[in-house]
Structure formats: C-alpha cells, structure tokens
Image (cartoon, rainbow, N blue to C red):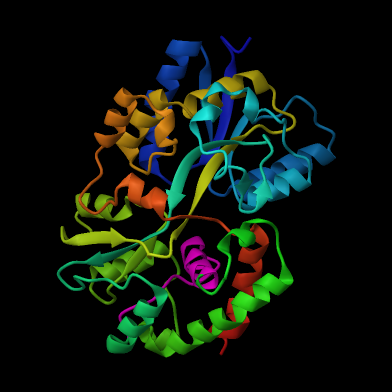
Amino acid sequence: MARGSRVRFAMWSGDAARNRFFREAVASTLQRDFAITLELAPVSDVAEVVNQFLNEKRAGLRGQGSIDLVWINGENFRTARQAELLWGPFAALLPNLRLYDAGQCARDFGTPVEGMEAPWMRAQFVLAHDLARTPQPPLSLAALRAWMQQHPGRFTYPAPPDFTGSVFLRHVLLSFAQDTTRFAEGFNETLYESAAKPTFAWLRDVKPLLWRKGETYPASPQELNRLFANQEVDFAMNYSPMFASRAIELGEFPATVRTFVFTSGAIGNYSYLAIPFHASNPLGAMVVANHLMSPQHLLPALRALGGPYPHRWDALSTIQQDQVRALPRGPATLPDDLLQAHFLPEPDAAYLVRLEQDWRTEVLLQ
C-alpha cells in the first residue's frame, strides 16, 4: 500500500552533510526499493514542528497533515505525547525494532515510549583531551576537581540551557545519586533534592577554577571547541562520540586529540522516529522508518556521517558485525563496546528542566 507513495520527513537541518546524504543516497534507495518518494522538510528546531502539530490539531485537521514522519526525542516527544499529537502505537509492527535494546529504548528522557516512536540512532556524551597537553585525563568528577585545582582556568562547559552544557550538569547530578536508574523513572522531588544539594555545592566550589573564573561560559559546544583548539582550555565535550575525529579530519583539532568517558558512565540516548496524528501517509512513514532502522541504511549512513552503531551486537549476523567493525572510526573515537559498557540512560526530562533552572540561581548568579 505504501509503494508508489510520497513520504514527507521532518528532520533537523543543522548538518549539511546529513541533508545531502538524505536527499541523494537515502531518497534514491527508497525510490529504488519501495517506489517511495522521500521529501525532506528541514527544521531548525523540532519544537517548532510540535507546536505546528498542536495548532493543526486545535484547528481540527485530520489525515491531511503536511508531515508523515518526524525525527524527535526528549522533551519534544513528551510534549507530543501529552497533547496526543502522535499516531500509533506502531513501533511493534516494524520488523527492525528487534535489533534494538528493548530496555534502553523503553523510555525517552524518562517518558515511556510504548510504541509511539521507533528508535533510530544513538548518541553518547564524551570529553576530548589532547595527549600532548593532558596525557592522562581525569576519569571521574573527583579527579576532575583535583585537576582543576592544579590547573585553574583550563576547564569550562557550555552554559545551560545549551544541551551539551546541560548534560554535563546531569553527569554531576548522577554522580551524587545512590541509584542512577531511578532518575529515568519520573521526577521525584526527594530524589532530586538529595543529589542536587551536593551537585550545586560541587559546581560552586569549582566555579572560581573555571575558565575566566566562571564569570562567563561558552555559549555552545562549537565555541568550546574553538577555545580547546586555541589551547585556552584543555577539554572539549560533545554528544557525538565522533566529534573529535571529525574535527581532526577537518584540521580543526590536532592529530593528538582523543576522547574519553568517566568511569562511572556516560549519559546516552536514542533519536526516535514518530508519526504525527494527522499524517497523510502513515503506512509509507512506517516503511521509511523501518528502512532507516535497518543495517542496510545505517551501515552506509554511519560510513558517510559517523556515529555510534545503535543495534544490539547479538542481534547482528557475523557478517554484519564485521561490517560494523570495518566502519571508519577516526583516531579519536572510542570503540562501540566501550561506549555501550558505560551507557547511562537519560534522566527524566523534568530533571533537565529543574536542573537548568536551579543552576542559574544556585551557580550562575552566585
């Protein structure tokens, strides 16, 4: 029923290489294998698309939406679920769902997925250091604090609500939690307060040791990358495990840069694919989603664009495992099995909001 149809896919437009790959390679494959015409609807912020869906629902639009499939996760998914803006559940109908870790994909920033979106790609937080400057990076927050005391002014993080700066704060929060898994199960005030108090004490304690004594912060990971490349600070951080290898390839970082994660774990998450409640072509959207979740798509996509492989290792054939091992990683990228072994699920989105608000009053304005 999907064959010969058109699927309009709303996806983040901030990566020119990804946009080109989807317009060319992905669109050609979908046309060849399924006679599906893929049309991209580039967006700068998925929240804007969710607001569009909300307005269209209020206007009574049904089955006539301009978007069939959307790349979504986190707070945007929670908002869409709460407002009943999604079509489904549908994920269990996709054969390639079996390739993903059911436990890791059961919640999206704490919100139960329950088949209303399908897992797609994986991201995970890493830090970068330069072997020529910092041959032995600190592998815990306690070690990082000791390192900052010995090297004042050489560390900083992007200012929340920047996503990368915010996830650094969540690592601090989880480091003071007795049970990190509970943070993914919905917001709990007592649980938050027990970890937040030492979190903000730690952040205030190290603030004078930060770049520019914590009086200002980089606005984005890109700005932090520039400070790192200019040797103004000794660490960078990112949600893409391959960001440092990509920067080396582009000549932005020296060849001696490597990445690492804290021994206590590194927060990671999945990107998901969802179908809006008023999609014109939900069946075509399901076919496209299942293809995007397949090794047939992911192997060439990650070969061209980079990123951690999202499937369970034991779900792959021996040939597929060899193909994943053969993916270009770059000199600074950690092995997938090491990243998986250190995977920490994202806390519930409500912790993210509260943590960013409290950081402003408890740290920034102090």
Q: Is residue 260 above or below residue 22?
A: below
Taking the image as shown, residue 277 lies to the left or right of residue 260, namely right
**Camera-side residue: 160 or 144?**
144
* Location of the N terminus (image quadrant): top right
Which x, y percent locates residue 155?
34, 78
- Residue 339 in sight here: yes
User: Where are the magenta residues, as a range?
Assistant: 153-174
Vertical relation: 176 (above or below) 300: below
In this rendered view, identify the residue nearer to me: 245 or 230.
245
Please give left or right for residue 45 compared with residue 121 in the image.
right
Q: Give the x, y percent position of residue 232.
A: 27, 77
Q: Is residue 26 above or below residue 230?
A: above
Q: Is 157 colored magenta in this rendering? A: yes
Q: Is residue 260 left or right of residue 347?
A: left
Number of callouts = 0
- Residue at image point 52% right, 15% down: 36
The residue that appears at 33% across and 88% down in the rendered structure is: 149
Q: Please tell me in which quadrant of the rendered image residue 210 appears.
A: bottom left
The location of residue 74, given as percent across then percent down, is 61, 51
Q: Residue at x 67, y 56 (%)?
A: 185
- Give the position of the C terminus as an image quadrant: bottom right
On the question of residue 240 being in view, the answer is no
